[in-house]
Structure formats: structure tokens, C-alpha cells
Amino acid sequence: MDRSSALLVAVSLVALACGRPSPAAVASVSQIVVEMNEFRFRPATIVLRAGRPAVIRFVNRGQIAHQIQADSLRHLPVTIVDAHSRVEAPGLDILRLQPGATATLSFLPRASGRMPFACTIEGHQEAGMTGVFAVR
């Protein structure tokens, strides 16, 4: 396991403490990479499993800032790790990335369903920069 993978597993372990899945469940987590560009997420549909940790690395490959906002994440505990910080929060309002920036978002989807998200910078969502977490 390379150093970045070890860090992600460690972050997931911390984020999933206190009644969440065991470390053995976290060890099987794989990272999903989502590219942000003008004006789309790739992939736009991210398949997740209810009750299993989600570790998603967002990479802004665009020439302008992009962000992700999902109402469904406002009340789920999350951990966000970027090049300069690590933040644990009781929910996520917006994750904004400047061009070339990367951040990893970890959370535990609790129930099956479709969780839409979008880049809510003015005009981006209207231009088609939307996606969905498909939780099974």
C-alpha cells in the first residue's frame, strides 16, 4: 500500500469511529476519483454502498474554480483532506476547489437512494455540471 492509500485508510478509520463500521470493513475501501472540469463531473454517477465508507477524491482539472454541493451531505459526518488540512465536520455545505486542487471527501452513506449533487457556482449547474451518488 503506498503512502497516499495508507493516509486515506487512516482518515477513514478516524472518520468512521464511534459506532461506525469496523476497521476491517474500512480496509476494503477503495478510492473513487472524480474529475471536475468545465462544466461536468467525470464520472457523473458515483455508485456507493449503504453502510460502507465512501472515499472520493475530487480533482479540479478545469481552468476555473468548481465546487460540490449535495443537500444529502449536510447532515452526514464527513472528513475532508487536502494538501494543507484535514477537517472533520458534522456535515458538508460546500467543497470548493481552485484549478489544479485536490481534496478527498470521506463519509458513510446510511441508506439506499439517489443523492444528487452539483457545482453551485453561478451558471455551472445550469451548464450541466451535475451528478448523483447512487447508493445501493
Image: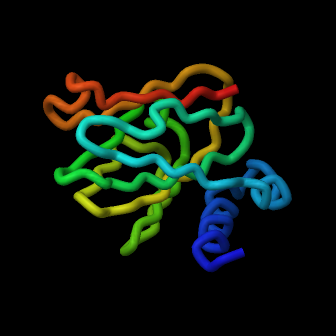
Picture residue at 51% right of the left edge, 30% below the top: 45
- Which corner quadrant holds the N terminus? bottom right
At 21% across and 32% down in the image, what residue appears? 124
Q: Quadrant of residue 47?
A: top right
Q: Is residue 71 above or below residue 95?
A: above
Horizontal placement of 44 versus 127: left or right?
A: right
Colouring convention used in this rendered image of the protein? rainbow
Residue sitting at x 81%, y 53%: 25
Quadrant where the C terminus sits is top right
In the depicted structure, whether residue 76 falls above or below residue 105: above
Is residue 51 toward the left or the right of residue 95 in the image? right
Q: Nearer the viewer, residue 43 or 21?
A: 43
Question: x and y percent of residue 99 in the render?
Answer: 23, 58
Of all residues shown, which one is farthest toward the bottom?
A: 3
In the rendered image, residue 10, in percent from the top left (x then y), is placed at 66, 69
Residue 8 against residue 106 in the figure, above or below: below
Left or right placement of residue 79 versus residue 37 in this view: right
Q: Position of residue 75 (x, y in %)?
A: 49, 36
- For this orientation, the residue located farthest to the left is 122
The image quadrant that residue 15 belongs to is bottom right
Number of callouts: 0
**Residue found 25% across the figure and 46% down from its top:** 66
Task: Estimate the x, y position of residue 134 in percent, counting from the top left.
Answer: 59, 27
